[in-house]
Amino acid sequence: MSKYTEFDFYDITSMLSEEDVMVRSMVRKYCSDNLMPLVAEHWEAGTFPSHIAKEMGALGLLGPGVAAEYGGAAMTAMQYGLICQEIERVDSGIRSFSSVQGSLVMYPIETFGNEEQKNHYLPKLASGEYIGCFGLTEPDFGSDPSGMRTKCVRDGDDWVLNGQKMWITSGTISDVAIVWGRDEEGMVQGFIVDCKTPGFSAPEQEHKWSLRCSVTSELILEDVRVPEANRLPKATGLKAALSCLTQARYGISWGAVGAAQACFDEVLRYTNKRIIHGRPLSAFQLTQDKLAEMGTEITKMQLMVWRLAQMKDAGTMRPQHVSMAKRNNVAKALEIARVCRSLLGANGITLEYQTGRHMCNLETVLTYEGTHEIHSLILGEEFTGQSAYS
């Protein structure tokens, strides 16, 4: 793997604070020194480098926006975005692990939990001592979470959960799971489930050709007893679960920039060195047209998430803003990865180069946390006032 250099044509760095740049530099060094050397081996083997959980925790990269009193790093939205960018510059699967830990596990506990839950779980999750997962998606209800079939029934001081969740990042290796189910009145409730609870199992989904550095699981709940003390008291209704997805999608929007930058950086250096008919591949008009298009799209992606971060830190960001950034940036990153792979020629299909790995990973990123088409409908409703879901 070659050394990373940043494409920053509009000098986005000059618009960052000194602390922002320090955070980015710290994460970039960690990713370059500790993650990049091992990612190809783990991707080929289809394994998650589990030792990185505590490494990332020690650096404050797990739930970086969580308050310091609960073990978090109390970073800004801008800094969280830069963290996602740098991690996904290495690999989407590893960024997915960190996103789930922070946005889908720690965020709902901090936002919807009580003080006892926050003090018990958040420091352990922030340090990487505990790994968590988020159980919302079901086999027949991905883009339509309102069709949720998982049930939670009150029984004395406990709740009994029955159901099945699908496509769950980190499920098999998790210590705790945030699980969403529908009670007898039809209200969606959220629970912190100890993964060692009888009746809970999380078989790993294997044979993936995407996100191979990330553990993907099924969650099976068969009469799983969860005490009332583990119900998230402020998380009533599907809106609570969907608000967690907004946090994750925000990080994904930034992460896609990192993946696109990695591919573009690699192909710039490759085309400058690859000699065809006595000239560098980069000297041909067709190549330069592709490079100009990709550089322009990356710049637009950078500006979009920079502004999104400003809005998030100011409290003016809405889910629809995140939908636009997630939809645009992931689709453009995938297009860029595909073009870069073609410019690499036969070399593009080998793990000696990272572009093909990013291309495969981004196929998943395009689909999860709301498909490209679902985000189109979210924006369509926002612009027209008309819902196209039914």
Image: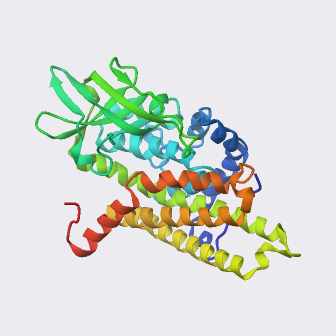
Q: Is residue 136 above or below residue 194?
A: below
Q: Nearer the viewer, residue 287 or 277?
A: 277
Q: Nearer the viewer, residue 246 or 127?
A: 246
Residue lying furthest right in this view? 278
Residue 228 rendering spot, x and y as whole percentages: 23, 26
Q: In percent of the image, x 54 and y 40: which residue is there? A: 214
Closer-to-camera residue (314/31): 31
Would you identify the image quadrant in which residue 321 lies?
A: bottom left
Question: In which quadrant of the rendered image does the C terminus lie?
Answer: bottom left
Residue 227 percent across, percent down from the top left = 25, 23
- Decide if residue 17 is on the left or right side of residue 195: right
Q: Is residue 61 left or right of residue 266?
A: left
- Residue at x 40% of width, y 20% of height: 196
Residue plotted at (34% across, 17% down): 198
Horizontal and vertical percent for residue 211?
54, 45
Asked whether residue 124 appears in the rendered view, the answer is: yes
Above or below: residue 106 compared with residue 276 = above
Q: Residue at the location (72% across, 54% down)?
A: 353
Q: Residue furthest bottom?
A: 285
- The x, y position of residue 305, in whole percent, is 48, 66
Question: Looking at this rendering, what residue extends furthest in the left direction?
Answer: 185
User: What count of labels does the image hold?
Assistant: 0
Left or right: residue 126 versus residue 161 is right
Please indicate, yes or no, whether residue 315 appears anywhere in the rendered image: no
Image side of residue 262 versus residue 228, left or right: right
Q: How is the image coloured?
A: rainbow
